Image (cartoon, rainbow, N blue to C red):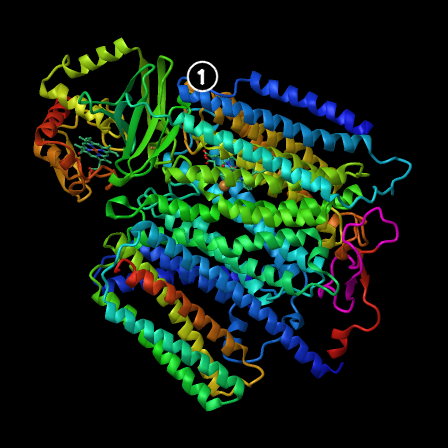
Amino acid sequence: MKHFSIVSILVILLTVIVYFFLQAVGLLPTQASSQAIIIDQLFDIHIGIIAFLFSLIVVFIGYSLIVFRRNKQMPDEEGQHITGSSKLEIVWTLVPLAVVIFISYLGAISLAETRKIDPQALDIKVTGGQWYWSFDYPDYGITSDVLYLPVGRQVKLSLTSMDVIHSFWVPEFRVKQDVLPGENLVKELRFTPIETGDFMVLCAELCGGAHAYMNSPVKVVTDGEFQDWIDEELGNFPQDPESLGERLAKNNGCFGCHSVDGKDGVGPTWKGLYRSEKTLVSGEKIVVGEDYLYNAIVNPNSQIVLGYPANVMAQNYGELFTDEEINNMITFIKSLE
Amino acid sequence: MNLSGIVKGILFQIVGSFIGAGIMGGIRALMGLPWKTEPAIVLGGLVGAIAFMVGVGAFKDWWKMALGEEVTEASEVVGKQGLSRYFGFSLDHKVIGIQYGILSMVLLVLGGSLALIFRVELAQSGLQLLNFVQFNTLVGLHGMVLIASILMGIAAMSNYVVPLLIGAEDMAFPRLNAFSFWIAVPASIILMSSMFFGGFETGWTAYPPLSVRGPMGIQMFFLGVFIVGYSSILGALNLIATILTMRTKGMGLFKMPIFAWSVLATSIISLTATQLIGLSFQLVMFERLFGMSFFTPSDGGNPILFQHLFWFYSHPAVYIFVLPGLGIISELLPVFVRKPLFGYKWVAMSSMGIALTGFLVWGHHMFTAGIEEYLRVPFMYSTLLVAVPTGVKFFSWVATIWQGKARFPVPMLFVLGGIIVFLLGGLTGPPNGTVSTDLHLHDTYYIVGHFHNTMFGGFIFPIFAAIYYWYPKITGRRMSETLGKIHFYLMTPSFFLMTFGQMRIGLLGMRRRIADYDPAMGFDFTQLLITIGGYLIAISILVFFYNLIVSAKKGESATGNIWNSRSPEWDILPSPAPVHNYAGIHFNVVGEPYDYGLIGSKYVELAQGIHQREESD
Amino acid sequence: MSSINNAIVSYQQKLAINRLGLWLFFASDAFMFGGLLVARFYLLGNKNLNLDQTLGLLVTSILLISSFFMNRAEVMVSEGNHKGFITSLVITILLGISFLVGVVGLEWGSAHFGPGDGAEGAVFYMMTGMHAFHVLTGIIFLSLVLRNGLNKKYTPEKHYAVEASANYWHFVDVVWIIYYPVLYLMGTI
Ligand code: HEA
Ligand code: HEA
Ligand code: CUA
Ligand SMILES: [Cu+2]
């Protein structure tokens, strides 16, 4: 019995130490959404359980190995012949069973809490593609490559992908949802930002190539600032074809693969593209003109530039954009000459 | 010229691959289609694997049997002796066990070295060494090659040890046994060759639609894993049959050494679930080759289907990886603490419990994948349920150790290390298992930390324990204790450095499978530590290999029951184990396997009187 | 114990092990076929595939009848009826080949979709193809058994090869009994 009392005390001590140590090092990023608070409460319970079970087993083993160690004088000493105890076995089957059922129950509650629906939620359509994010605000008719969110209001994201599986994740919000291709596989994610500031959407599912760089800024702003941003987006920017084209290219992920400053990317840079001379995979040499550009956007595989892969650029830009929009982008590309 | 089996096999494989590729080219040419590399390498790989088996001589006897001719009984085949027998076709389970072991270690070094390469890239932010495809290929191959290494490693332990433990002359199907091993060799070559066909971008999980696009190295990956899978299925079939039918007299199921139980449980999973990873990979192969759209949504497919099929194997697979290792722990612990295994029946049944509940939990890898909402909560309950039988094992180990008179030779150190490391791995499981916390954790380095803990604790540590423990049985010599201790005391802290680092940055937002990370997140220093930890592990393993090779010639000779164990292979057999296990020395089971500390008790006893099989010869 | 007795005992014991091994293989293979069933339901629900019902019924009956003859063959070899055994075996093989011709030759040729036509095509060709592959291997086993049977290698006591290939044949048949309604009938009512 004496041994058990000592061990119990040691277990409790170690549990407390481990628990407070884990709390003190700051395991998780800041809590920037109301979901984060709920989820972190569950993390807290987990940490407590981990600290306890770890201490329980390590202390028992360590204590036994040290205190009951072999007497140097009797190297052949054998342990006691104890083969088992059904009572104990039942206890340590049933108690953990109860514990895990309880944790699962807490987990179910926690999940339900994080998924609470606010009918006033702000609708945003999120599109992921190799390798960019694009955000549509259907209520306002805005498309942006930065996710602007008003603080304190629930957002409802409808997520879809252009190509492969991506995953929407903002560590400070804690929640994550894979983004699947296919019209019937649009997924929904809700959260409520509670802290203003700058964050990052990270793509958390390996999606090939530049997966590491598939990040976009998230700006959580006050209501007023959000309204200002909307106003600015809606009216107060230049309406000339060149600027319109630049915005289109920016918001649709072209810059994920094409740079405008001469750097080589997944696709050829646009800087100095217009009127430059290019060699195609077919061996043909051409001088880039408007027709070529139009074709390169609408039907990219028909003329692959030497040194770049086919099938990488989406094939459906022709359907996605109106001719006017494409012409605007061409004007923009021309302006980079 | 008498080439040893493996050389001949590889030559045949090379020729076969070209023939296969040529046939595909020919067929396409006849159909008026141009040359295309992808179908050609697939058929080439397949024909190459079969050619390897022909070259190594795996089909010879089966062919005779198919023609109704008599073949020599496996037990009467006199194999080669000496070192060369390990490189040719042999039917002896002990030889095959060691062959598996060699393959496992080769794969461990290959897979580990891949990690060492990409760890350099990750040691600091920015891209220094690798491009994206190279990085992704290395990560995915690291995962899969090491998983193959685990499968080979558990096959090595089961093959070598199980027949000895249960007093069988050999496995139930010796030819199938040899086949299962040898098919894994060309499969490993094919798997590695994926690097040279453009690599692949998908990680070991190979999710479509990404795997449907991308470089064609993925086909070699699929083919290699498919064949390794078959090796594992056939091996499992053999082990189940062996354990169920070939036990010696008096050995009821509940009198088997506990390791046999864990192998039985593992084999049930490998036998059945493995089909599903084969199938899921096959479907993607066909989608790429024939345009059959199983997983492309725009053509009516569904990428989630793949994930269901894949994880239906790959979750139970993680219990395939650990159950034999946990079995080793349960097997060795009583020997070194000189006490009976606490609650034998419970420990035996907990293996079965883990194996069976393991089938019900695959959805926990898909909490964020967009599966049907109503599935997430049930999968959460079932996932956490696995903790219960696992806990029974832990508590029984603790109770076994309690008041034991422990001694600490190297195998015991690895057993204890395994317990602690696996405990950490297991305890980091439940936070992944509750849905809402997993929303944060999924696809982060926390998960990476979780599974390195479980796999090291459940496989790497135990297999080292097993090697140190049974090495004298194989060679008649001990491995050096000093070098063994250096190995242990270098590897364990380095390992903690590595995985604690991984879990820490994972919680803070480090994603998996990224070649570069934002320096603003402040991970550079920890990443450097992880890399250093990885390299220290590698150095410790180098020490191990040195020990392994040098001790075979120079080790202290050990012929008797050096661990003072009750199990038959130590109690009855001399070391090194004779060619025909117990030929002429049959034994009966007369007591309980782990009655340490009960004076005068016996587990096994030589059979009295004549030896029946001898007589009929 | 005399050594003859011993040989019989060890043959019996081997037989038991071989039987167990075969059943374990079936268990494993069943998971693969099950996986394909899951794929069918997951992708297509209980959608009907609009296949040729007459042909479907025909090939199914052929396979069922072949199973009957296979059983005859096994019974006859254990009764020592050599001629009957060979005849039944030949009939089984011929029926097996007609099944293959029916599915791969006719059904694949006449179906209104190809393997590349959406999930329906993919699922249909994969399921029938995988099953046909098993039938093909079955025919190869049976042909070997036929060859050895003609060489009088089997006795009423020792004919495990016949038993094993018969069981394999029945197993593949049972798979089709499940696949047939799932592919042809489901969704028609
Ligand atoms: C050997 C391998 C192994 C083992 C044994 C385990 C064991 C467990 N794993 Fe792990 N896991 C992996 C290997 C393994 N895992 C791998 C490789 C991946 C990543 C795959 C990939 O995406 O690449 C993964 C990923 C993974 C995920 C998916 C995470 C994600 O991607 O989002 C989850 C989620 O639930 C999970 C949970 C668990 C749980 C609950 C256990 C449980 O079995 C643990 C049970 C043990 C204990 C809990 C400790 C001892 C018990 C007690 C002391 C009793 C009392 C306990 C309680 C009351 C809680 N694992
Ligand atoms: C048994 C399984 C196993 C083992 C032992 C290891 C061992 C190691 N793993 Fe592994 N790891 C996995 C299984 C394993 N891993 C899996 C399944 C994945 C998931 C893959 C995926 O996401 O798709 C993964 C992923 C993974 C990642 C995440 C990559 C990412 O997502 O970005 C990292 C990163 O740190 C990592 C690191 C390491 C390191 C440093 C080691 C070290 O311990 C390695 C130590 C080295 C050796 C064991 C080899 C011995 C070497 C020598 C003796 C040197 C001699 C060599 C020569 C002379 C040439 N691993
Ligand atoms: Cu998109 Cu990763
Ligand atoms: Cu799992």
Q: In the figure, is residue B453 to the left or right of B21?
A: right
Residue A223 visible (yes or no): yes
Residue A312 placement: quadrant: top left
Q: Is residue B86 above or below residue A320?
A: below
The structure residue drawn at horizontal position 41% and vertical position 74%, both measured from the top left corner, is: C140
Q: In the figure, is residue B405 to the left or right of A285?
A: right
Q: Is residue B521 magenta?
A: no
Q: Is residue B586 magenta?
A: yes
The structure residue drawn at horizontal position 31% and vertical position 22%, both measured from the top left corner, is: A155
Q: Is residue A306 above or below residue C165?
A: above
The structure residue drawn at horizontal position 64% and vertical position 35%, both measured from the top left corner, is: A95
The residues colored magenta run: B572-601
Q: Is residue C95 above or below residue C53?
A: below
Q: Position of residue A117 (x, y in %)?
A: 34, 25
Dividing the image into four equal quarters, which quarter contains ligand 1? Answer: top right
Q: Position of residue B79 (x, y in %)?
A: 65, 67
Q: Position of residue A45 (x, y in %)?
A: 55, 25
The structure residue drawn at horizontal position 59% and vertical position 24%, both measured from the top left corner, is: A48
Q: Determine which residue is flagged by label 1.
A: A30
Quarter of the C terminus of chain B within the rendering: bottom right
Q: Position of residue A275 (x, y in %)?
A: 11, 29
> In what element is the residue under mark 1?
loop
Numbered disc total: 1
Quarter of the N terminus of chain B within the rendering: bottom right
Mark 1 residue type: Thr
**Chain of the residue under the numbered disc 1 shown in the image:** A
Residue A187 placement: quadrant: top left
Residue B567 placement: quadrant: bottom right
Residue B285 visible (yes or no): no
